[in-house]
Amino acid sequence: MALDDRDTATKLDFKVVGTRPPRPDGIDKVTGRARFGADMTAPGMLTGRVLRSPHPHARIRSIDASKAEALPGVKAVVTRADFPAEVPEDVADVLDNCMAGDKALYDGHAVAAVAANSAAVARKALKLIEVDYEPLPHVTDVDAAMAPDAPVLHEAGGDETVPEGHSRNVMSRVQFGHGDIDAGLAQADRVIERSYRTAATHQGYIEPHACLASAGPDGQADLWCCTQGQYMVRDTCAAILGLSQGQLRVTASEIGGGFGGKTTVFLEPVALALSRKAGRPVKMVMSRAEVLRASGPTSSSSVDVRLGMTRDGRITAGFAELRYQGGAYPGSPVDMGSMSAFAPYDLENVRTVGWDVVTNRPKAAAYRAPGAPMAAFAVESAIDELSKELGLDPLDVRLKNAAREGTKASYGPTFPAIGLEATLEAARAHPHWSAPLGENQGRGVACGFWFNFGGNTCVSLNVAPDGTVTLSEGNPDIGGSRASMTMMAAEELGIPYDRVRTVITDTGSLGVNDVTDGSRVTFAVGLATIEAARAAKREMCRRAAMIWGIDEEAVVWEDGAARPSGPNAGEHPPMSLAEIAAIAPNTGGPIAGHHEVNAEGAGVSFATHMVDTEVDRDTGAVKILRYTVFQDAGKAVHPDYVEGQFQGGAAQGIGWALNEEYIYGDDGVLQNPGFLDYRVPVASDLPMIEPVILEIPNPGHPYGVRGVGETSIVPPLAAIANAVSAAAGVRMTQLPMSPPRVLAAIHGADDG
Amino acid sequence: MSQIHVTTTINGDATEFLCEPEETLLDVLRDRLGLTGSKEGCGTGDCGACSVTVDGRLVCSCLMLGAEAQGARVETIEGMADGDDLHPLQQTFLDHAGLQCGICTPGILVAAKSLLERNPAPSEEEVRYWLAGNLCRCTGYDKIVRAVMAAADDMRRAS
Amino acid sequence: MRYEAPDSIEGAVGLLARTPGACHVLAGGTDLLVRLRSETLEPETILDIKRIPGMHEITPEDGGWRIGAAVSGAQINEHDGLCADWPGVAEAVGLIGSTQIQGRATLAGNLCNASPAADSVPAMVAAGALARIAGPDGTRDVPVAEVPTGPGKTSLDTGEFIASIFLPARPERSGDAYLRFIPRTEMDIAVVGCAVSLTLDADSTVDSARVALGAVGPTVVEVETAAEALVGTQVREGAQQQLATVCSAAARPIDDKRGTEHFRTHVAGVLARRAAAIAYARAKGDRA
């Protein structure tokens, strides 16, 4: 056949892709019918609850659950003793985080759990569990945790990358870059050295973690949960509980936000253990306080930057040392922060050093472009300050140093076609850049980078006898991806959007799909969808060729139908997908296409953000006046949801920059485990956020698609800090820029 | 501990239920009546995902006891569409992509409906302040606010 | 736990007297249910006062307004007469929480919760409001300022509850205002709050004034020196400056997760001058 499945040319003419149809799950979600994590029930279901440590650091001498077990209505109590003593190394920390072993490592660390026939009984039972704690000294600050005399969380200490003489809380060290920093700084007309700090923030999804587990005595188990990856849940829980992956079926519910925070497990292994012990289904739902105390926030950070610039704005050298605390276990995203810090720039001399540090806080989970926003905050603030000192336009400086096709990135690879310059040019040309500012107002810009992932992907596309199509994919739809997949399938098949339905399958129905993360889904699942559709088209062309009695090579697929093509094809009326599907039983059976791939070529992504702020000099209050996002989407499949990603990332960045923070007291206890004092932006805090979509096709995707979900949270921290610094007349180097901090900075500058 | 018998009207239907004294209206709706469209995002009145109206007044159902619903008229997201006919707000949320994950959507729709019943032509600022108690973490509120204003336009034109 | 919804004040008082210490009054419930949820409170009995006649009513009385204990913030802000007389009190109660909270939260509840940061309390204190307390011996009226005695503590005796709040007749040429500072635009607890109520004489000079600060001490503070700074002035720059200075001096705040001592002290003065300017404009008859 004429259809070349190795065709790597980027498609440019689209009928469906680029339009804005209603999302397929829309009606369910505006009518309350959509079923999220906590919305499922099972016959005989019990309620599970977790007992959590009130201490930030304590040895667990013993746990006596006998009184709880004796309470009428209690059907099971589990502690660490109910989990295997030995588990595979890659899930050991996950298990310890889900259920503490010898030590409770943070305020909120799970130490026991109960399943009872009502929530009230479960609550009462928790109070009857007697835990004998030996409180230990604790540390929650990253720099304090690195001090030689800091309380130590894990006696074994860090890995071989950590040089001698460091605190055992330093778990690893990474380093990236090229060139000679000292030589580069010597070429600079001006050098800046600054330290920056950011507070830990939470992903803040509105849906708390929830699951419903049912484990039978035969080793089979079913789990329903809100997650970004049902296969990850399956594999992790199976490893922790000693189940086989094939015997555990995980179904992902609709998911009420994740932003990286649902790429691991918290309740799921506990619910399975309780269910196994009680012999009944167990449902568990976290409270908001539990979400904040015990599910993954991102790291707090402490970053030093040294930057040299010539009078005309050329960056001669960039150095950053990044210290991230990842909570009680190794695995802060300092590696990605170190890789991304200088990624937007074409630098001869660049180096980053990253330190992964443990503290008595909840284990950090991924949060939208993990590690990158804090690094960009530091580097983009330093570039801004240096540009201002040299009297240079901050967009000009960034354009002058911008990475482009062929640039050797600071973290190693050489970039193919990328969109950073396009976003900067668009920013400079936008009316926002030249709009006048009033008194106490300031404008800031910053750039951001994210890698984007590909990964393991498996989809199946099935043609029904009536000519409609079902696409089965294995990635939870977190922000409209079913619409995008449906559109790409319809585009490729040449049939209307409403003839395709995309469903998210359980783990039993498809092969492995990596987690919905890394902005991978529209790219990788989209790619697999297109390839699956192409496979189905090949099959349908083959069926048409068989009916017409001509060679497969003489049939092409155009506008939703097989058509004869070429000199020897003969005259045959086209056969539509529906016509071929109707007689499929007579031509060889059902028609389907599928595709399995470990996708590469995700295509890196860049954005430039521009923001105007106003500062109340009497109170330190900051108002966001105007916000514009310029980002490369490669190809925007459903522009509404691309814009939504730009706007949502900017809004989370605004929260991070201004008011969100984990506040620990001297006692190591989290002081603000609720939406009252963990202050995410509310509707009246924000202006409209203007999204400007640039489309520089990704050569690694048939339609040119790049991931768009994460990059939009990378620039806001710095863009807002630059704007507030301009408005307040004093440089802000610590987040959040809460009113007390801004007022203190203004007063400090006035006094100085 | 004895259960309380409550007679109420939910989405126009006469409804009876038994509940424990400490159960919230949200608990009752979700766990006893199967109306899981109202969501619990916080349980402390800070997120608005559980928004319902009681006797026409917008409230957080997590901050009201089930027992207090005696004799009241409760409206939830499940009662917003008229059969297959979506409320104009539901339609504009679909048309304007006013939702991403959708967990906050029921509460926001209930709250927005309550706004438009009182103020058929709200300004952007009025929409934003009315909805300040409905947290959305996905959208940055932009498309939500636009969808509410578009629905207000549609409803004014239709009336 | 039991839920009781008596239909008379006497019934309520009787229940309160029978279960001292373990009976909690439910009006709007916006604080009580949060405490139930967090298990910091495990009462024997929840006493819902909303079935008692009059609890939902705003009625004119002696030129002022009597506000039933279950009247919600939304009801108050929909009441044109009350809003015209006491705009500062109305805006203070209107600032409590979200639209949803407004549907339930009450003045009486805000007062009994006894948080130093309660928005409506400084405004009621500045307005000279009285709380009518029902108890075993009948009812008594006490100034609002005397109800909270410390964070979470009130002067109510066993068996007592607040049945209504009375806002007195508003004198001629007077106005009130309440401002608070919060980090966001909505949904936060006041980091500092300030209410000003003042009355002018015929030539627009302040004749009498009351200034109350919230969230800068264990209870709401009425600042007498602030009233002195305003009386005899036309609230111009010098008087505003003096007002700010004495309000900052009167503030005895703490450092906590919501604000620093330095911040609260400074902002108490900032809010006082801003609120005084609004109250003054209102007293002069300017629409604000």
Image (cartoon, rainbow, N blue to C red):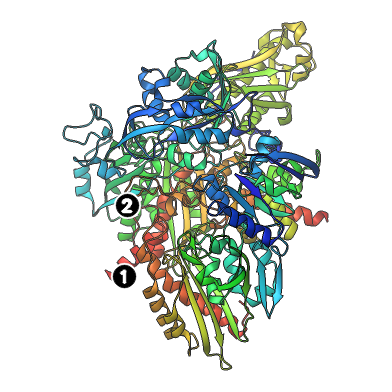
- Which of the image's four quarters has the N terminus of chain A? top right
Q: Subunit of mark 1? A: A
Q: Position of residue C271 (x, y in %)?
A: 47, 72
Mark 1 → mark 2, Cα distance in angstroms: 22 Å
Q: Give the residue number, with chain letter if any, for mark 1.
A: A750
Residue where numbered disc 2 is placed: A382
Give me the residue at 55% from left, 44% from top: B42
> Relative to A587, is A601 on the left or the right?
left
Q: Amino acid at mark 2?
A: Ala
Dot 2 falls on which chain?
A: A
Q: Residue at x 73, y 43 (%)?
A: B6
Q: Looking at this rendering, what residue extends furthest in the left direction?
A: A165
Direction bottom: furthest residue: C203
Question: Where residue C20 sits: x, y (%)?
Answer: 55, 54
Q: Secondary structure at mark 1?
A: helix
Judge left or right: residue A251 versus residue B81.
Answer: left
Mark 2 falls on what kind of element? Answer: helix
Is residue A727 at least partly visible in the picture?
yes
The quadrant where residue C285 appears: bottom right
How many numbered discs, if any?
2
Upstream in sequence: badge 1 or badge 2: 2
The answer to whether one can see residue A705 in this image is no
* Circles 1 and 2 on the same chain: yes
Image location (x, y in percent) of residue C254? 37, 62
Q: Would you say A494 lies left or right of A394 here?
A: right
Q: Nearer the viewer, residue A478 or A93?
A: A93
Relative to A383, does residue C176 appear above or below in the rendering? below
- Quarter of the rendering containing residue A505: top right
Identify the image quadrant of residue A99.
top left
Q: On screen, A81 above or below C200?
A: above
Q: Amino acid at mark 1?
A: Asp
Coordinates of residue A120 in the picture (x, y in percent): 56, 36
